[in-house]
Amino acid sequence: MAKKQFKAESKRLLELMINSIYTHKEIFLRELISNASDALDKLYFKSLTENKGLSKGDFEIFITADSENRVLSISDNGIGMTKDELESNLGIIAKSGTLQFSKDNEDAIKTDEDMSVIGQFGVGFYSAFMVSSKVEVTSKAFGAAEAYRWTSSGADGYSIELCEKESPGTEVKLFIKENVVTEDGEKAEDYEEFLLEYKIRSIVKKYSDYIRYPIKMECVKRQKKQDSEEFEEVKEIQTLNSMVPIWKKNKAELKDEDYNEFYKSKFHDYTDPIARIHSKTEGTATYNALIFVPKKPPYDFYTKEYEKGLQLYTNGVMIMDRCGDLLPDYFSFAKGLVDSEDLSLNISREMLQHDRQLKIMARSIERSIKNELKKMLSNEREKYEEFWKEFGAQIKFGIYNTFGSAKEGLQDLLMFSSSSEEKFTTLDEYVTRMKEEQKNIYFASGESITRINALPQVEAVKDKGFEILYLTDHVDEFCLQMLVEYKEKHFMSVQSADLDLETEEEKKEIKKKNKENKELFEIMKEALADKVMDVRFSQKLKTLPVCVSGAGTLSVEMEKVLSQMPGDKKAKADKILEINANHPICDKLQFLYDNDKDMLKAYADILYNQAMLIEGINLENPADFVMKVADLMTK
Ligand code: ADP
């Protein structure tokens, strides 16, 4: 039988899994049961919609523990897998082709600290290799005539062969590793305990109690012998789980731990969620919802492959794994499920989109997520900041992508760094701190706070005692532009041409000076051709000789962001070259105007390029700039 190789990344991950020193190895059982339950869901749904004549009572998960041969098996009579499915589902772990292992990832796994690194890749099935030296998956797809067996002893590959299996479904057989015993006879790793009834029972109870199909096992029961005081041990098949879906239970009965374990097993995460919403709604739409906000985004969150959505159930039957219509894009990080009483089982994706009940549910889910986040922001600031670091960009994109129509609900969730707060500030907090004479909410954009602080215009605003929001994310300025204003205060870029910080006197003075030098500026403008709209002296600069500011709605910073996007038609900002009226360079320019117009043109070009450098914008012709400066240096 030919052995096939795992894809490179899968192989690497598998090796890590095999050598993992993760202490909670027991979660392998939760993962396999969860897969079995998904397979049962799929077949149950098929049988209901296609009249396959099966009833829910027919479905089960069966665990068999054979201590003698050290084999643990988990079988289900669910949808099963064809040969191709065995190959594609179990031959490749990470579904994203772009998956990369960084050194950090590997170290994290090895240090046992952060299983979430593995978790991010959604490697449920492979956790079996933490406890097994060999894994055999025997499966017969529902409706298929043949069954196949997938076998692997680890990273060296796997094989698939035709085999016998009577009924459809899947059996996963784990050949449990031998215990590792240290020299002094202590058990360093106890794998064999996973074959013990009490251990299996407790793992199932802990992680899989809510599974809505019976998880059965042959158990030993001590009972009184008939007509005697003596005890005997008899074997009987018992159901280990209570089968009540957690979302149907009363909140009062549930502990944080119950929710967290449910979340982790259901949504293949290794980290507890940061927030949850459990609601029961009656009225225009009757449904239960259980929604979680993960602590960290899954590995594929920022890729095209990521699909937002909540699981959709109708009366306890799952009808859709990811119903995207239940979540707006800006909350695409949310995980969870909705169990409705009003939806038909046979509803198609297309019909769902137009379903009134679904729309009502989606609106109310959106509202509850917003409220939960607002609550977190006011009561648990640190936690919210953690959330914001991971998913804030999503919300900013939300405001931008909806052209500001979603701003009412979202603007109070926004946070930015600012010049007066070391940490994040909300817009509301900014506005309460505003000075009486301050008209605008000031912001400055740049790659980093250090970069922004070096911008010449920042100094002037800070000098007035006005706070500045630091926009370091590409989307930030686009988002603020959609907001236009907050609590009747306009957003104003410190890099904008009409910053308007000068006193009336200063304004008058500069106006006069600009008028006197009209022709000088004409020559400079000409030298800069279509690069700038205007050249002028300005009072807003303190130390640096020059800056560019934006005159239109598209700022210089936005131009920079757009220039990094694909496509050859680049939008350009209307730029104004502002020269520090109090800098000796002004006299020099005036001197050149009188004596050497060619040199004036060269100066215009140098000043423009200097301003671009301060903004962090790549020069169009750096060699030319260097030559011009070198010329001056050697004069
Ligand atoms: P995930 O469950 O996150 O998709 P897994 O690695 O655990 O990842 O499983 C990979 C895939 O293999 C599943 O998505 C499913 O299609 C298939 N699979 C696993 N176990 C079973 C099973 N018992 N019955 C049918 N299909 C299964």
Image: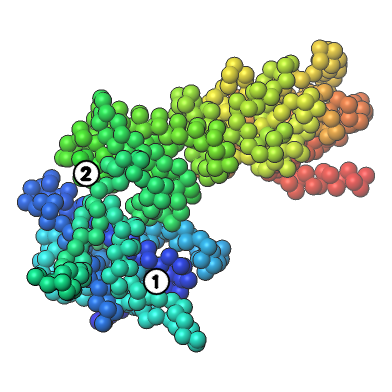
Q: Is mark 2 within 8 Å of ligand 1?
A: no
Point out the image quarter for the N terminus.
Answer: bottom left
- In the image, 545: left or right of 126? right
Nearest to the observer: residue 310 or residue 91: 310
Does residue 120 show up?
Answer: no
Q: Kindly identify which numbered label has been placed on residue 130.
A: 1
- In the image, 476: left or right of 630? left
Ligand 1 found in image quarter: bottom left
| Residue 426 at x, y percent in the picture | 60, 31
Q: CA distance from mark 2 to mark 1?
A: 33 Å
Nearest to the observer: residue 349 or residue 365: 365
Q: Secondary structure at mark 2?
A: loop
Q: Residues within 10 Å of mark 1 (few under 14, many from 20)?
A: many
Q: Is residue 337 above or below residue 211?
A: above
For badge 2, the amino acid type reads Gly
Residue appearing at x 85%, y 13% in the figure: 505
Residue to which mark 2 is pinned: 316
| Residue 165 at x, y percent in the picture | 13, 71
For badge 1, the amino acid type reads Met
Residue appearing at x 16%, y 61% in the figure: 77
| Residue 217 at x, y percent in the picture | 21, 66
